[in-house]
Image (tube, grey):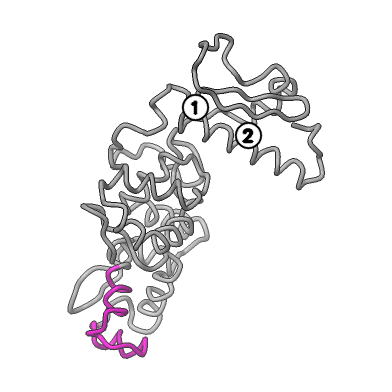
Amino acid sequence: MGKLSLYEYPDASLNDSLEIGRKIAREFMGSVSRATLASALQMSDRGGGFGARIGAMRIWGIAEGRGTIRLTRNGLRAVNPLTPEESAMARRDLATSVPLFMELASRLDGLPPDRARLALLLEDITGANRIEIERRLAVVSRVFEDVLPLLPLSNGSGIGARSGSSDSPTRPRDVLDDTGLGFLDIPELLEQGSATSVGLHSAQEDVGEPRIEVVFPGGRISLPESIASLDVIIQVLQERRNNMTRGSGPSAF
């Protein structure tokens, strides 16, 4: 397992960890000794690679135990479900078991981050130094983005949102809260058609205030220079790119 400050995270993806879980369920009836499992995986039970895989299964909540590795209830539901719905629900529950990933997802609203933004978010959330973050960034990015579609959004909606859940970790002050802008509802904005033509900028622009401006046919974005504003602009441009990819053309934006 990996660790940034007080935050632990799995070194192996959820899918890779579930593959080992399936092996434990099918070949060992859900419980197996550490040495026997290592042999079945053709690994050394004293090796770092095997330890990282077992540690990842514990962090995901797939397995528990040390000398004997046992699948948890959610682990069994995910690898040996009675219905597809049970499998999907179990995978969502497992995905939400990593506090660091829940914190990241709450600040991204389902959007995969680029390398620079992920590094800044990790620094803000964990307080770890940048050299340590740089060393672990590739693994965190790969494992996190694999489960991002399963995680709840900051507003409680999304594929991974669990209604009535009260055990999600409380997140500290969000970096997006600094201007009060948050994320715009871009799909709703697009349905209004002419919203971008009248501009996303505020009606009262302070003279001399640093701003970010993007101009395109039929629309203009002008927002105060901040992380929140950049997030809004990125979302708008992504939707514009999706429209062009689908063949709708820039005019559909």
Residue 180, how many percent across, how many down? 43, 22
What secondary structure is marked by label 1? loop
The answer to whether 172 appears left or right of 18 in the picture is left
The secondary structure making up most of the magenta span is helix
Q: Which residue appears farthest toward the top when viewing the image?
A: 204
- Disc 2 marks which amino acid? Val
Front-most of 211 and 70? Answer: 211
The residue mark sitting in front, 2 or 1, is 1
Q: Which residue is denoted by mark 2 in the rendering?
A: 236
Residue shown at the point (65%, 38%) measured from the top left: 237
Q: Which mark is residue 225?
A: 1
Instruction: Residue at 42%, 31% (x, y): give it.
Output: 176
Residue at the far front in the pictured view? 208
Which percent across, then down, holds residue 84? 52, 60
Q: Are marks 2 and 1 in contact (CB under 8 Å)?
A: no
In the displayed structure image, the side of residue 196 where residue 60 appears, left or right? left
State the residue in front, 170 or 70. 170
Residue 92: where, in percent of width, then height? 43, 53
| Res. 12 image quadrant | bottom left
Q: Quadrant of residue 185?
A: top right
Crowd band around label 2 with a 10 angstrom C-alpha radius: few (<14), some (14–19), many (20+): many
- Residue depicted at 38% across the width and 26% down the height: 178
- 198 or 31: nearer the eye? 198
Q: Quarter of the image for the N terminus: give it.
A: bottom left
Please report the bounds of the magenta region as a residue range.
33-55
